[in-house]
Amino acid sequence: MARLDWYIRSNLKLAHLQLIVALDEFRHLGKVAAHLNVTQPAVSKTLASLETKLGFPLFARTTRGMEPTEHGECLVRHAHDILRRLTNVEDELRDISDGRIARISLGVLPSAATVLVPRFIADLNQLNTGITTSVREGTMEALVPRLRTGDVDFVVGAQSSRRLGAEFESELLYDDPIVVVAGPQHPLVGTPRLQWRTLGQYSMVLPTQDASTRQIIEDFLLDQGVKIPSRHLESLSTLTNIGVLQYTDAIGFMTRTLAHYFQDLGLLSVFPLQVPNATMHMGLVWMADRRKTKVHQIILDEFRSTRDRLVRDFLINPL
């Protein structure tokens, strides 16, 4: 183990990491050689030397090409992480040279990508801080692991009742209840004293089975005597849901902030129906062990400020 520690600290080079990542990506010596602009024998020699000095094989030749061993998978994972961090260093150095303060990456839940995050970015730009922001959209299950690897600095999305663990910090911003929506030309638009049972006559757009609000919506509908129709769509894509509701007579379920935003644009109608206890708890998550910087505090303060504007405009519930 002492020899392994010495080799990794003193002799493992950036070129080795680039080779390992390329081998994992292409799984073919010839393609790796072309990608790295070296000869195939040079790739084979470097890999053999690296495996000898580490003391274990990293890739095995199979009928499917070069397959990473368990040791190889470990090194590939860390090589990706190291190369990504070096890219971040390059970006930050360029930002400093260009007069920008910092680069912040946000992982964003689709339900936060339409109203909360665009307003936050607009508010942040007005501060003239020079902070560069990048946004990656996805589910909480996909985004939270990106916090661990440093791909994103904050995740903006739904907070679960289950604790994420001591490695994370979080802050709740507001509650966003689930309401019932449909296209602007839906037959039920304008119906006085609309009843839940009436909804059972139409197809539905529902959250996916793994969404935190799905079971709550389903149980409530059953309590109201509304059976989930066999003809329904399961989707967390805001744009897909909006399109389906416009082109069909389906009934949908959406956070109140999003629903009223699209109603103001003439794309949806919001029914006077709300699912009790079905609420998205919108907030921020970040790594507890990351160094708190001036930029980190600016981001937190500006999200709180944006939250206050949303409270005023959409009558959402602050926390």
Image: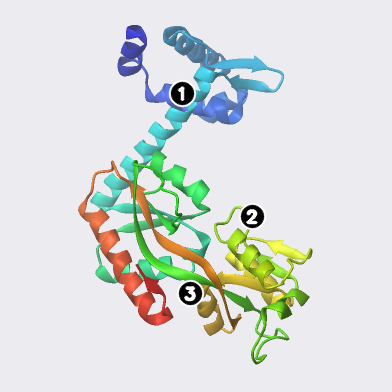
Determine whether, in the image, residue 193 is placed left or right of residue 82.
Answer: right
Residue annotated with mark 3:
257
From this view, report whether residue 158 is shown above or below residue 260.
above
Picture residue at 28% right of the left edge, 60% below the top: 300
What's the distance in space between the residues labelled 2 and 1, CA to CA?
A: 35 Å
Q: Where's residue 168, x and y in %?
A: 35, 45
Crowdedness near tag 2: few (<14), some (14–19) or many (≥20) residues, C-alpha within 10 Å: few
Residue at 26 percent of width and 54 percent of height: 296
Quarter-of-image position of residue 188? bottom right
- Observer able to see residue 199: yes
Residue at the image point whose x is 69% and y is 71% from the top:
244
Circle 2 SS class: loop
Closest to the camera, between mark 3 and mark 1, is 3
Q: Position of residue 123 (x, y in %)?
A: 32, 71
Q: Which amino acid type is shown beneath numbered disc 2?
A: Gln
Contact between labelled residues 1 and 3, with CB atoms less than 8 Å apart = no
- Give the spatial CA distance, label 3 vs label 1: 44 Å
| Residue type for callout 1 | Leu
Q: Which residue is disc 2 drawn over?
A: 209
Q: Quadrant of residue 194?
A: bottom right
Tell me: 233 left or right of 21: right
Q: Nearer the viewer, residue 107 or 176?
A: 176
Percent across and percent down for residue 309 are 34, 76
58 displayed left or right of 192:
left
Q: Earlier in the sequence, mark 3 or mark 1?
A: 1
